[in-house]
Image (spheres, rainbow, N blue to C red):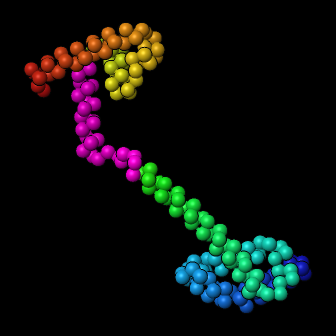
Amino acid sequence: MSSSDLAQHQEVEALYSGHHGWLHRWLQGKLGCAHHAADVAQDTFVRIISSRDALLGIDQPRAYLTTIAKRLLIDRSRRQLVEQAYLAEIALVADTLPGYPSPEEIAMAVQALAQIADALEGAPARVREAFLRHYLDDQTQAAIAVEMGVSKRMVQKYLVQALLHCQARCAALADHPL
């Protein structure tokens, strides 16, 4: 450690030991919380330590510490405002979005999907694909036609076949329950 670094270290140590308690009490009066006051007091001295020329020509150390601490309080206040606005926005979005489905809703959906799978059992693959894309994936008939490489009219025929197949399958299952 060079002599100038040693001298600066001793100045910071003297400033800390001579004024930390006072700064902490002053900040506690401003903030009303000993823990927050301790954080800001510590941040004040960290700011001084991180600045190489911080202690050059200080005639009034308490005024200097107060100035740094006030700036840190302003920064802290700005961060809190941003955080509060962010949390308020998240709460607003959370209130407008549907929540996670309940276990009962999940069970009903699984049961409905099982019934659809049973109803479509035995239908040709392209008929099943068109049905699932249209009714479960909410795709338009035109989009399905493009993806399947067929005409829109053919997709309509597939959907009619799927519905007729489901109707016949459901009737057969009703006549011969498992």
Horizontally, residue 22 falls left or right of residue 166, namely: right
Q: Is residue 112 magenta?
A: yes
Residue 126 rendering spot, x and y as whole percentages: 36, 14
Position of residue 78 measured from the top left corner of the image (x, y, whole percent):
61, 65
Q: Residue at x 43, y 16 (%)?
A: 142
Res 148 seen here: no
Residue 159 visible in the picture = yes
* Placement of 149 over or under 84, stated as above or below: above
Q: Quadrant of residue 118?
A: top left
* Residue at x 27%, y 25% (from the top left corner): 117
- Which region of the structure is painted magenta? 95-121
Q: 126 and 153: which one is in front?
A: 153
Which residue lies at the image location 76% right of the left edge and 82% below the top edge? 64
Q: Quadrant of residue 54?
A: bottom right
- Picture quadrant of residue 62: bottom right
Q: Residue furthest right?
A: 3
Residue 26 shown in magenta = no
Q: Main secondary structure of the magenta part?
A: helix
Up-down: is 100 above or below 82?
Answer: above
Position of the N terminus by quadrant: bottom right
